[in-house]
Image (cartoon, rainbow, N blue to C red):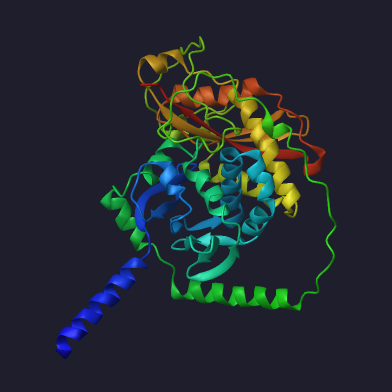
Amino acid sequence: MKPIKTVVSLLLITVTVSAKAVPLLNGLAVEKQFNKDLYIAAVYSETLTDETAILLDSNAPRRLEVRIIASSLPARRFRNQWMEGIAINNRSDTLSSQSESMLTFANLFKGRFLRGDRLAIEFAADTGVTRVVLNGITLGEIGDPDFYNTLLLAWIGPVPPSTGFRDGLLSAGNVASSLLTTYEALEPSSERIAELQLRQISVEETLAAQTPVAEEILPKPTLEVADLPPPTLALAPNPTSTTPNPASDTPNPASATTSPATDNASVEPVEAAAVELAQGTPATETPAAYREEVVEDMEEEEAPLTADLILARQIYHSALLRHTFRHIRYPKRAQERGHEGSVRLNVVINTRGEVQEILAVQESRYSSLNREAIAAVERAGPYPAVPAQLGSDSFSFTVPITFDIPD
């Protein structure tokens, strides 16, 4: 009888462990900027699905994960992109209520990520706590039970980094084997883990030695800008249109429009370097490495973060996107040929809202769509002036544009 009891005990242990097992891999997506792979993003859930609403279920443990492909990635650049995605895909009242949580999250990212780094963002359904972990080292925790969904919407909300990125994460477990192999092979070295452990110990010792100082209470920035009416575009249904839009007062994704636009240029697929920038200079004269450095330089000039500053930036960015989306036209010839795609631009404006620079961060396969995205930004200028509260001589923001023809 003892052997039988032993087997039964092992089975019970196995069932218990399975019940607490990590969520299943729902999908993978590659983030690419300046024609360079930066990282692979992953979404884990207890239920494999292609529906946004199920992944937003706060009653189940879930996890987001990022594994770095690039040899080096500035943490601030990574953080800024995520914060912009939050601003685009969440309601203004959500941004206001979670400004302190966003500040905590943003301040967790310092220095640079290196190839093989694994960043995990874990949601515990029983406590509602979101834990941020880098290479097995906990960077911090956020207690707001709604914060995890705020982050997740930046990836799978109405305006994701690209439709391909969102579709990859909403693949219900149908992941390409080659991508999965690359993802699983990415891991940090023991030296890297030791370095981060020492850094974390230093941070904790510094915080323990600090004397609390009374913080000046500043008025919250107004939310009037964020509540502008949606752009007057004939939008195509997006892949998650069956799900109630959690960001009903955020900018709608720029998509197919029947505006009478002409497209006299060739629409054959082109390489990324063949796209022309706003000043008419071929992209081949502005190497991707240089453009990447320009973006990083702009990030280094940022003022120290506060909750109010984060909220003000997000409100202003939302207004800039709405302004841009009103000027997008779907090239007629591209529509006739069924050409679709996503374009992401980095735009720099001065304090008066005048466009100073346009960089193509991510391009579609079609030159006509790439040119139209840049032309839309040019037509949109001048933008609303930069709020004095931001305290900057210029403002850099990302514009994600999806050209999608209705079925």
Q: Position of residue 309 (x, y in %)?
A: 74, 48
The quadrant of the picture occupied by the C terminus is top left
Query: Residue 282, percent across and down?
Result: 53, 29
Residue 305 seen by the camera: yes
Along the horizontal axis of the image, is 47 left or right of 119?
Answer: left
The residue at the point 57 percent across, 28 percent down is 281
In the image, 270 versus 396, the foreground residue is: 396
149 sits to left or right of 47: right
Residue 349 placement, left or right of 293: right
Q: Position of residue 66 (x, y in %)?
A: 46, 56
Q: At 38% from the left edge and 40% from the top edge, which residue is drawn?
A: 167
- The single residue placed furthest to the front in the displayed view is 1
- Residue drawn at the location 74% of the way across and 28% of the way down: 384
User: In the displayed structure, would residue 40 be above or below residue 320?
Assistant: below
Residue 345, image x, y percentages: 56, 34
Confirm whether residue 68 shows in the render: no
| Quadrant in which the N terminus is drawn | bottom left
Query: As drawn, is 53 to the left or to the right of 407?
Result: right
